[in-house]
């Protein structure tokens, strides 16, 4: 399949992301003030840049692990069935856990992940999403913390891909297909 030509318009700058992460880290720190070691779980692959920046702003003990779920494949259509492709190494029973997601779109991914993790009986389980597209939501769910609410656009950068490209952009940009302009 040939790729439709597109370009990327910057939506959120690297500087704005960094400033927002500083604020979010302070809020997280407050919520987990009695926690000895926070278990931070990144959802692969889209959250890898966000989690790297976020944990470096968290002035507390953290353990980091990753969970990978099946995602959109190489297109922009959401598949509704969420499968676990890579599970955690560590047990979370009795632990204080923070799940880090790149984008909450329909909400199916986060819902499935929370239901799986809750069944493992953590002491506390909160969620943070860098981006939220409320207009796309199909299940009633909101992350505990959200970096930015964005409109219904397909975005890339800062860890987030389109067909496995553009994850290394330092900012968040929206994909503009040139045949739709
Ligand atoms: P949900 O299950 O529909 O909430 O989708 C969540 C996942 O879909 C995110 O973690 C992303 O991996 C992917 N996703 C949703 N919107 C976008 C987008 O605009 N660009 C790239 N990936 C996206």
Image (spheres, helix red, strand yellow):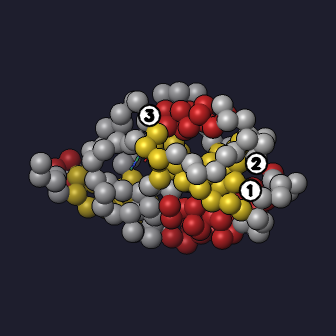
Q: Secondary structure at mark 3?
A: loop
Q: Compared with residue 148, is residue 56 higher up or lower down, i.e. above or below?
A: below
Mark 1, Cα crowd under 10 Å, few <14 / some 14-19 / many 20+, is many
Tell me residue 97's x, y (percent): 70, 48
CB under 8 Å between callouts 2 and 1?
Answer: yes
Please indicate, yes or no, whether residue 135 appears anywhere in the rendered image.
Answer: no
Q: Give the Cα distance between marks 2 and 1.
A: 6 Å
Name the outermost residue toward the top: 139
Number of the label disc, if any, that sits on residue 38: 1
Q: Is mark 3 within 8 Å of ligand 1?
A: yes
Q: Earlier in the sequence, mark 1 or mark 3?
A: 1
Which residue is more in the foreground, 32 or 121? 121
Task: Name the residue: 31% across, 38% down.
Answer: 77
Q: Which residue is mark 3?
A: 82
Please indicate, yes or no, whether residue 92 appears anywhere in the rendered image.
Answer: yes
Task: Name the residue: 63% across, 59% down.
Answer: 64
Q: Earlier in the sequence, mark 3 or mark 2?
A: 3
Q: Which residue is mark 2?
A: 96
Name the outermost residue toward the right: 34
Q: Compared with residue 159, is residue 86 higher up or lower down, i.e. above or below?
A: above
Q: Quadrant of ligand 1?
A: top left
Q: Is residue 151 left or right of residue 28?
A: left
Task: Name the residue: 44% across, 34% down.
Answer: 82
Q: Secondary structure at mark 1?
A: strand
Q: Secondary structure at mark 2?
A: strand
Mark 3, Cα crowd under 10 Å, few <14 / some 14-19 / many 20+, is some
Count the marks: how many?
3
Tell me residue 85's x, y (percent): 43, 43
Q: Give the Cα distance between marks 3 and 2.
A: 24 Å
Task: Name the residue: 49% across, 32% down.
Answer: 108
């Amino acid at each position: 399949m040939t790729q439709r030509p597109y370009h990327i318009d910057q939506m959120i700058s690297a500087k704005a992301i960094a400033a927002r992460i500083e604020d979010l880290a302070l809020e997280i720190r407050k919520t987990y003030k009695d926690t000895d070691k926070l278990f931070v779980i990144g959802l692969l692959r889209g959250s890898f840049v966000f989690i790297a920046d976020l944990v470096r702003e968290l002035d507390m003990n953290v353990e980091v692990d990753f969970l990978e779920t099946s995602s959109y494949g190489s297109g922009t259509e959401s598949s509704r069935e969420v499968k676990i492709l890579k599970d955690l190494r560590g047990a979370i029973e009795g632990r204080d856990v923070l799940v880090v997601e790149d984008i909450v779109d329909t909400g199916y991914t986060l819902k499935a992940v929370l239901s799986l993790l809750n069944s493992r009986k953590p002491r506390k389980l909160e969620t943070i999403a860098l981006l939220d597209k409320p207009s796309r939501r199909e299940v009633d769910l909101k992350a505990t913390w959200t970096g930015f609410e964005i409109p219904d656009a397909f975005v890339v950068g800062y860890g987030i891909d389109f067909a496995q490209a553009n994850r290394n952009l330092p900012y968040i940009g929206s994909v503009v297909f040139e045949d739709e302009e």
